[in-house]
Image (tube, rainbow, N blue to C red):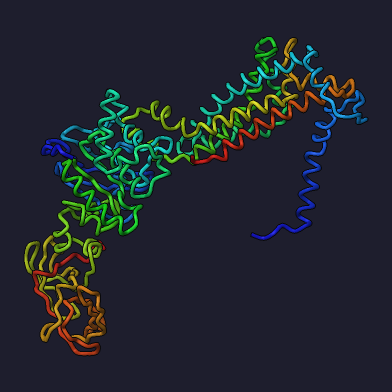
């Protein structure tokens, strides 16, 4: 692409108290969300958490049971899918089997009042964008998975949507191709400046692609923030476990509140950690979440016994048996010579640990 | 894969003889030089040549062809619409019942269908003839079209239709540019099936036809009562050929699933 995309003035998507009920099942439960234009937002969660439903509500395939969806201030209620200035890339790609690559990409353009030459020019531009110029006359069943993914992307971008919705865009690709494609997708988005809303169940993918991540569980938006914030300051046990390995130690919360260092009375003794989001009232059950790399093995701290050490290349993973029988995982740089069975001590900085409410799970 | 047992082959062979033996006999005797149906007197195509001179037979053949084309066309349109309306993804009260009602004529005794249509036409004062046969045939072949098209629709990826809508196609455009091209093989197969069924039908046509509209099966049936002639064998062989071609076409089109 030679023409740099102008900074986007459009593509601001807002969800206001959106709920969607299917019969008795509440698929989306009161989601409030404001998406910055021109950024990549990832909806992350397990299958059935409502993330795809949120996408389908935005595309117009479903109507919300309650709440509003606003695109650049315009309420999308009652606007049918074919009149919404958003486009979707489907998980299955949904390429038209009876049309070749170029005519798949042209499909959306043919629905507009564009001349033949304008359509041809835009199709060529799109195919260049995804590096598929050479395959324009192939049929979808003659393409590899990665090529199909790019056709689907080109087709969805051809109409220059204000918001591009991507449903598990890389889910059908194998691991190696997925990582390469993540980088390409990210670069493409930066160049175009289109707002991307990506649905994924893969935390690693969300972390690579997203400017901000919204974690969903059981129809609710659990936590929204940049990957680093979700990783370092998870709001719930679910978010903590989703984004990486975590040690959880249960106990009773001491005095304090959101934004303070509090103590937690645990079977390992009183421990201090930071309460970022308000874990609960004093005396309530709480959890201490601690990433393995934040735990250091040394000569001071909580006493335990080193069960084993696993060499993982860039780091070593230690499993340490504690006084009450639980096992904590710690990781460190290779080189430190601890041998299995040796008594060790575990230490951590209170700011590196988060306090979470015991409920909801 | 396990090999078929010799006995299985024998059973298959026996079944085939049972199914196609009589038909084969008819085809063979249509090339018989003798006028006597049961005596072989050498190969000849004289009965085929003679067919063209048999005015009533040619006329009946034309009636049958026209009825088959018109009724198959009507049945294909209505059957396809029924299949679309009853497509399993749509949910509305009474859908299973309606689906059953569309399929019921498949197992309805033809005598009943014929009789009830006759009563209807008489009751409405519609003069019986060419168009009443067309309507009657469309009525009983419609369900076959609906079944074939519905099977294809069931395999149609729903996200294709959503993708089309997402890319700016209004519902009618989605149908024209995506649904129809993808179900076209089934629609054509349904047409051929309806065409065949209409061409074969004797019972229903007998009920609802009127003067001047005698179909080929009706003509053959009435002539056979006066004795089987090699001419009848010849026209029957042509009929078998036409039907086989149509059925073959239909199965080829239905087998090409998902392409």
Location of residue B216 (image quadrant): top right
Quadrant in the picture for the C terminus of chain A: bottom left
Where is residue B11 drawn, in percent x and y?
78, 51
Identity of the residue drawn at 29% across and 47% down = A28
Question: Extreme bottom residue here?
Answer: A342
Q: Using the image as rendered, state which of residue B163 and residue A117 is in the foreground.
A: A117
Looking at the rendered structure, the number of numbered marks drawn on it comes to 0
Identity of the residue drawn at 65% across and 12% down = B124
Where is residue B49 drawn, in percent x and y?
79, 19
B104 with respect to B237 (left or right): left
Q: Using the image as rendered, state which of residue A327 and residue B50 is in the foreground.
A: B50
B140 with respect to B202 (left or right): left
A344 with respect to B39 (left or right): left
Identity of the residue drawn at 72% across and 28% down = B110
Location of residue B198 (image quadrant): top right
Where is residue B229 drawn, in percent x and y?
87, 23
**Vertical position of residue A135 compared to residue B234: above or below:** below
Residue A250 appears in view? no
Location of residue B101 (image quadrant): top right
Residue B118 appears in view? yes
**Vertical position of residue B178 compared to residue A278: above or below:** above
A308 with respect to B84 (left or right): left
Q: Using the image as rendered, state which of residue A52 and residue A357 is in the foreground.
A: A52
Quadrant in the picture for the N terminus of chain A: top left
Question: Extreme left residue here?
Answer: A260
Identity of the residue drawn at 68% across and 9% down = B127
């Amino acid at each position: 692409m030679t023409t740099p995309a102008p900074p986007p003035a459009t593509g601001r998507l807002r969800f206001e108290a959106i709920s969607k009920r299917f019969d008795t099942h509440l698929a989306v439960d009161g989601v409030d969300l404001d998406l910055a234009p021109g950024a990549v937002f990832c909806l992350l969660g397990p299958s059935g958490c409502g993330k795809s439903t949120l996408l389908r509500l935005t595309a117009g395939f479903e109507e919300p049971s309650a709440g509003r969806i606003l695109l650049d201030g315009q309420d999308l209620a009652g606007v049918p899918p074919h009149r919404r200035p958003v486009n979707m890339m489907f998980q299955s790609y949904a390429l038209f089997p009876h049309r070749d690559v170029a005519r798949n990409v042209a499909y959306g353009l043919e629905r507009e009042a564009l001349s033949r030459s304008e359509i041809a020019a835009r199709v060529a531009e799109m195919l260049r964008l995804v590096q598929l110029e050479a395959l324009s006359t192939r049929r979808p069943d003659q393409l590899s998975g990665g090529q199909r993914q790019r056709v689907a992307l080109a087709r969805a971008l051809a109409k220059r949507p204000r918001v591009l919705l991507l449903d598990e865009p890389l889910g059908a690709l194998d691991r190696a191709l997925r990582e390469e494609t993540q980088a390409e997708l990210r670069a493409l988005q930066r160049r175009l400046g289109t707002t991307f809303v990506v649905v994924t169940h893969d935390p690693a993918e969300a972390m690579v692609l997203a400017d901000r991540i919204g974690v969903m569980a059981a129809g609710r938006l659990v936590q929204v923030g940049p990957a680093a914030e979700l990783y370092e300051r998870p709001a719930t046990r679910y978010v903590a476990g989703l984004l990486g390995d975590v040690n959880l130690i249960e106990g009773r919360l001491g005095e304090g509140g959101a934004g303070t260092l509090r103590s937690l009375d645990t079977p390992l003794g009183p421990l201090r950690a930071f309460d970022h989001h308000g874990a609960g009232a004093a005396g309530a059950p709480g959890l201490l979440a601690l990433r393995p790399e934040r735990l250091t093995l040394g000569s001071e701290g909580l006493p335990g016994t080193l069960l084993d050490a696993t060499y993982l290349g860039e780091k070593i993973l230690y499993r340490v048996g504690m006084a009450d029988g639980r096992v904590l995982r710690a990781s460190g740089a290779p080189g430190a010579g601890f041998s299995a069975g040796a008594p060790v001590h575990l230490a951590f900085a209170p700011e590196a640990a988060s306090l979470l409410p015991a409920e909801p799970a | 894969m396990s090999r078929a047992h010799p006995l299985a082959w024998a059973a298959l062979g026996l079944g085939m003889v049972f199914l196609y033996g009589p038909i084969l006999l008819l085809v063979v005797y249509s090339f018989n030089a003798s006028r006597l149906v049961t005596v072989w007197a050498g190969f000849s195509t004289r009965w085929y040549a003679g067919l063209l001179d048999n005015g009533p037979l040619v006329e009946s053949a034309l009636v049958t062809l026209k009825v088959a084309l018109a009724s198959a066309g009507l049945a294909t349109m209505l059957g396809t619409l029924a299949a679309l309306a009853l497509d399993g993804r749509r949910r509305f009260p009474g859908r299973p019942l309606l689906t059953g009602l569309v399929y019921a004529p498949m197992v309805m005794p033809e005598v009943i269908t014929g009789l009830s249509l006759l009563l209807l036409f008489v009751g409405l004062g519609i003069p019986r003839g060419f168009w009443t046969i067309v309507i009657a045939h469309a009525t009983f072949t419609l369900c076959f079209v609906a079944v074939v098209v519905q099977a294809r629709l069931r395999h149609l990826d729903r996200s294709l239709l959503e993708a089309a809508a997402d890319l700016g196609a209004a519902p009618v455009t989605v149908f024209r540019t995506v649904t129809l091209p993808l179900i076209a093989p089934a629609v054509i197969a349904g047409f051929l099936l309806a065409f065949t069924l209409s061409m074969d039908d004797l019972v229903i046509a007998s009920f609802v036809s009127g003067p001047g509209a005698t179909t080929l099966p009706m003509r053959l049936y009435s002539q056979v009562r006066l004795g089987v002639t090699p001419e009848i064998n010849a026209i029957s062989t042509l009929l078998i050929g036409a039907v086989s071609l149509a059925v073959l076409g239909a199965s080829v089109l239905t087998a090409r699933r998902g392409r």
